[in-house]
Each structure stands twice: as structure tokens, then as C-alpha cells.
Amino acid sequence: MKLVISAIALAGALAMGTVSASAQVDPYCDQYARDYAKSRAGGAAVGGAVVGGIGGALIGNVLGGKNAMLPGAAVGALGGGVVGGSAWKKQYNAAYVDCMTSRRPVAVAPAPQAVYLPPVGSREWKNMCGQKYKSFNRDTGYFLGFDGQYHLCQLP
């Protein structure tokens, strides 16, 4: 009985060691890291639990006879699952950190600069319109467009 309680306590301590603090997670890198860890250590927790269960049953049989096989298998499965899960977590953490460090920051467009436009009809306005449109008439403020119509000068 002491063996079973000790094994359960050890498995619980291992399980507590794999829990990590959760912080704000980047959704893109989180999904990337999950996919990466799944491809690298996908069934590690299940495989570890199976191997641990078989090993625990064998050790329980050797140390405590047939009465200790079932508790040994349970503890071995739990411990193997925790160890296998930690392999997945290592793969996940490595991929997440790699993703976060390799991502480029989103470029923020610079704020548009204020453009000085002279008042309509002023001498500066007429000079700028004369430079923009060859057919600009300084007396009327209109230019002849490609459509054959006259239009008021529009500065940017």
C-alpha cells in the first residue's frame, strides 16, 4: 500500500511540474506551435501512458505480486502520460518561441503630412494651378479638360 501511495504522489508531483503559467498568447503562433508539436510528438502522451502502464504492471508484479499489478499499471500509465506530454510541451514551446522571434512587426504607415494649400483665387493658388494645368486661365480659375469642358482647378 505504501508503494501505491508513494507512486501516486510521485506521479502527482510530475503532473504539477508540467503545468505552466498562461499568459496572453498570439493566436497565429499558438496554432503553428500546436501543429508543429503534434507532428513531432503527436502521440507521445498516449504512447508514454501505454509504455508506463505496461512497465508499471511489470514492476508492480515483481515488487508486490499480482495484487500490485493494477495499481502499478495505473501509476505507470499516469507517469508515462505526464512524461510523454512533457515531450509534446517541449516541442510546442520551442516552436512557439521560434515563431514569436521570427515574426516581423507589423509596419505602421506613417501619418500623412499636412499639405499647405493656398486659398482658392489667391496668387499662390493661380501659380500652382498654372504649373499643374497648361490650359489654366488665370482670370477665370478654370482649365480646359480632355473632355472639352472647362473645370475649376483642383489642387491635391
Image: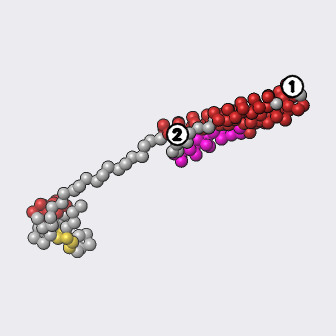
The residue at the point 26 percent across, 72 percent down is: 147
- Judge by depth and name the residue closer to the eye, 78 or 1: 1
The residue at the point 53 percent across, 47 percent down is: 27
- Residue 130 visible in the displayed image: no
**Is 21 on the left or on the right of 137, as rendered?**
right
Q: Which image quadrant for residue 74? A: top right
Label 1 vs label 2: CA separation? 47 Å
Q: Which image quadrant for residue 120? A: bottom left
Q: Position of residue 82 (x, y in %)?
A: 69, 35
Q: Which image quadrant for residue 58? A: top right
Residue that label 1 marks: 62
Q: Position of residue 70 (x, y in %)?
A: 84, 35
Main secondary structure of the magenta stretch:
helix
Say what amino acid the circle numbered 2 marks. Answer: Cys
Residue that label 2 marks: 99
Which residue appears farthest toward the front when viewing the image? 2
- Judge by depth and name the residue closer to the eye, 78 or 109: 78
What are the residue bounds of the magenta stretch?
26-45
Which residue appears farthest toward the top when viewing the image? 63
- Residue 9 visible in the displayed image: yes
Q: Secondary structure at mark 1?
A: helix
Say what amino acid the circle numbered 1 marks. Answer: Val
**Is 113 on the left or on the right of 88, as rendered?**
left
The residue at the point 24 percent across, 61 percent down is: 156
| N-terminal-most mark, 1 or 2 | 1
Number of other residues with Cα within 10 Å of mark 1, as a class: few under 14, some 14 to 19, many 20 or more: few
Q: Position of residue 84 (x, y in %)?
A: 70, 34
Q: Position of residue 39 (x, y in %)?
A: 66, 40
Which residue appears farthest toward the right when viewing the image? 66
Q: Secondary structure at mark 2?
A: helix
